[in-house]
Image: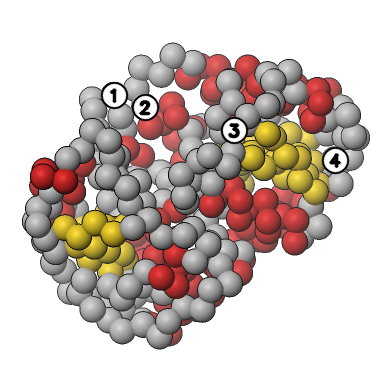
Amino acid sequence: MNYMTHTIEPWMPVGATKPKDDIAKIARRQGWKTIEIERATQETVADNLTPHLTPSDLVVHQFPSYLPLEFEENFRNAVQQTGAKFIILIHDFEPLRLSERQNSEREYNLLKRSDGLVVHTAEMAEALAIPIPTFVLGLFDYLTDAKIPDRKLTQDLIFAGTLTKAIWLKNFTLPIKVFGNLPRKWSSDELAPTLKLQDVLPQDTAPAELPNGIGLVWDTDSSENTHYYAYQQLNSPHKLSLYLAAELPVILPSFSPFAPFITSHKLGTTLDTLTQLPLTFDYDPALGKKVGQALRSGGNTITLLQKIETFYLGHL
């Protein structure tokens, strides 16, 4: 039997759990069972999650659970003691995003002692350099049953998501619609009048509710201890999946792992700095619709799960 973990955390802000929720849902549709991890009540001892496992089972763990690192280590050990395979599916890996991380060596050891890894991109795999079986997800899927409106191409800029990593918005003077909550340390007086702050959209219908425009993917560092800017060279931004699922053209950093895919398929364009805006570019709406449909149906995750099954079934 194959299992996918799913951390239950109902207090999280809108959109924060969407990537994990979708992967768990797609796995269930493919016949995988779910191991639910109740973040509010789960102790660091993890034996309660594994008594049903056998040596022929696979467990893909969506990491991090944001429980203490001791839980992550205990859970891996508990799974492996049953003889089952333990694969970590990385959503974020903080040692790559933050400097002076106290437990970074333990976090790397957690990955090294697992039976396999799922990473966002080949670039992330290279940065981690962990010699165990590694699978690349690529773009995150974005499940929704909401009907995407017929899109009209406009030059309106759109930004959706967490604003904490978007310090650049404080100095951005071009017109832009921003869907997100203002961080507590920010003041609306700091923002240009051309920035129109919108309500956070419901995560399951956001692709249909985003207006026409161009989705912007861009992060900056909030302090000298963060590596959000450099992390864009490795990761798969969920907001990119949101924009593509919404069938919108996108603009992303030229150093993003997805830059070649976006430009070669005429799904948007790239830039080196925000000072290059506004930009004009070719866009293929038919291909944009096709890519959006694939992400909304879970195609990337289904392919990933099939690769994992094929690999480990051949090694059991």
Give the CA separation, mark 3 to mark 2.
Answer: 17 Å
**Residue at image point 48% right, 72% down:** 292
Element marked by disc 3: loop
Q: Which residue is mark 3?
A: 65
The kind of residue tagged 3 is: Ser
Contact (Cβ within 8 Å) of mark 1 with mark 2: yes
Q: Which residue is mark 1?
A: 225
Quadrant (top left, top right, bottom left, bottom right) of the C terminus: top right
Q: Nearer the viewer, residue 207 or 182?
A: 182
Contact (Cβ within 8 Å) of mark 4 with mark 2: no
Disc on the earlier residue, 3 or 4: 4
Label 3 environment density (alpha carbons within 10 Å; few <14, some 14–19, many ≥20): many
Label 2 environment density (alpha carbons within 10 Å; few <14, some 14–19, many ≥20): some
Left or right, 255 with respect to 135, comes to: left
**Residue at image point 41% right, 51% down:** 237
Observer-side mark, 1 or 3, equals 3
Q: Is residue 83 visible?
A: no
Q: Nearer the viewer, residue 215 or 233?
A: 215
Q: Which residue is mark 2?
A: 98
Disc on the earlier residue, 1 or 3: 3
Q: Is residue 88 above or below residue 304?
A: above
Q: List x then y, in percent, for residue 89.
A: 61, 41
Disc on the earlier residue, 1 or 4: 4
Q: List x then y, in percent, for residue 221.
A: 25, 35
